[in-house]
Image (cartoon, rainbow, N blue to C red):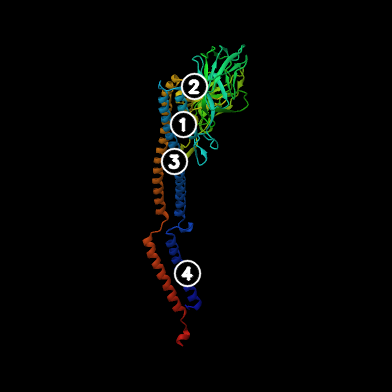
Amino acid sequence: MRISQNMIYSGAMRHMNAALGKLTEASEQNASQLRINRPSDDPVGYAQARKLDSIISNLSQYSDNVDTARSWLQQADSTLLEASTVMTSIKELATQASTGTVTAENRQEIATQVRQLYQELLSLSNTSVSGNSLFAGQKTSSDAFKSVLGATVQDDNLTSADVLSVTGQSDTSLLVQFTQSGTVGGSADLGFRYSSDGGSTWATGTLAAGSDTLSLGGCAVTMRSGAAVTGDADGGGTALILRPSALYLGDDQDGCAVRSYGGSPVTATAQGSFPGNVAVRIDATASIPGAVSYSYSLDGGRNWATGNTASGARLPVPGGYLELASNGGTALSAGSQFTIVPDTADINVQISPTAQVAINSVGKDVFGGLYRAVGASNAGVAFSSQPDQNVFETVGELIGYLETNNADGIGDSLDKLSTAQAHLETCAADVGARENRLDFADNTLSVLKDNTTSQLSSVEDADLSQLLLDLSKYQYAYESVLSSSSKIMGMSLLDYM
């Protein structure tokens, strides 16, 4: 067949382009060090590589989360360590003040030092990380505690619960003594006296009949109506010491709300410590009080634990119980639902696909103080069942005893200070345990990331030694095509005529 110049030119261009394409592909792989630079290079391998990229990205985010959590927990650890050191100094001063040879003036001097250390404890409880309060639960934009006045009750027949509130501020402890016996809020006036200098000088006042609030100059104390107090002209009966305390302003995890769904007018409350939201479904029409058939779900209604029956209005569920209000026999409709929503305060950070860690703390559970529980009209004392663990209240009581020259009270405070410090150290141990968990999680993430990176490398990385050989081969081939094509296309029959 006849070979035309056009056929020669087309064939030369085709071979040159093919050789140039292979050379370009090899050059691109050499520049990127990757075998797969676009889906068309290897569709299956490209999809696998992108999946591995996603896994590596997630692992990197978990590592970042671990770093964030570590910064919070390290700050909490150092803060609690410093608080424990402050408590040690306070115990040393209390031991010194409890000695019988120490004078009232000496105790006032020691009280001045303890007040400064108390302010340091208050400052530590309001520690923040990057502007976020560390001990306020999820209320990270504000301080966890504020300084207030608390009351120490000196009467075996009364408790701190008989003092509903103390308002106002005072630079020194106020000693209040009843000079008449009677009942708070009763039909007779009650006389009292108070001192701001440890009993050196006194001012007098009267609690009017029917009233429950004592006015003390710039402060006021509201007591429970009906509380029985004793007193005499020398102030030998019921006494109160108004001294420093701290009010918790953050979140707590002690309460829960109940939301109801359906047409039933029955309301409900919940008691207990719940791991999360608990949905309760009424399975058959019932009357309250009466037998109730119900199911509950811990995963938002995807799965239900059925076949539960309660003989009364209290329905047991994991973590506690749901108590239905009796509405005079009002029918409880089948299909009615209630959801228990526990209060939350923890800030949880995801450190793996299946694990998370709390990076903050509930301040009242660490430092104690006073706080207003859900539904309460007045603030109460944290750790009411174990009051000796309450750091702020214990140190505040000590200041009151020091400034009123109460040697017996100072001696009683020594054991309480040890208990409160031990509680701080327990909280620090909990923080340390979470830090250790982060170390293990970080090591695991590092291993997983290295393994996944190796898998990705095996899928998309180029074989460098083979790539260099291919690059040399394709370059030689392209140069050969150029050389041979230029010689062939330069030939003509006219050269031989």
Of labels 1 and 3, the one closer to you? 1
Asked if residue 216 lies left or right of residue 21, the reply is right
Task: Name which residue type carries label 4.
Answer: Asn
The mark nearer the N terminus, 3 or 2, is: 3
- Which residue is labeled 3 in the image? 70
Quick one: which residue is furthest to the left in this view? 465
The residue tagged with tag 2: helix, strand or loop? loop
The residue tagged with tag 1: helix, strand or loop? helix
The image shows residue 433 at horizontal and vertical percentages of 40, 35
The residue tagged with tag 3: helix, strand or loop? helix
Instruction: State the residue in front, 99 or 207.
Output: 99
Q: Looking at the image, which residue is at 52% across and 39% down?
A: 132
The mark nearer the N terminus, 2 or 4, is: 4
Instruction: State the residue in front, 253 or 239.
Output: 239
Of labels 1 and 4, the one closer to you? 1
Task: Name which residue type carries label 2.
Answer: Thr
Q: Choose top left, top right, bottom left or bottom right for residue 73.
A: top left
Quick one: which residue is furthest to the bottom in this view? 497
Give the answer, above or below, for where 441 lies relative to 32.
Answer: above
Q: Residues within 10 Å of mark 1 (few under 14, many from 20)?
A: some
The mark nearer the N terminus, 3 or 4, is: 4
Q: Choose top left, top right, bottom left or bottom right for residue 425.
A: top left
The mark nearer the N terminus, 1 or 3, is: 3
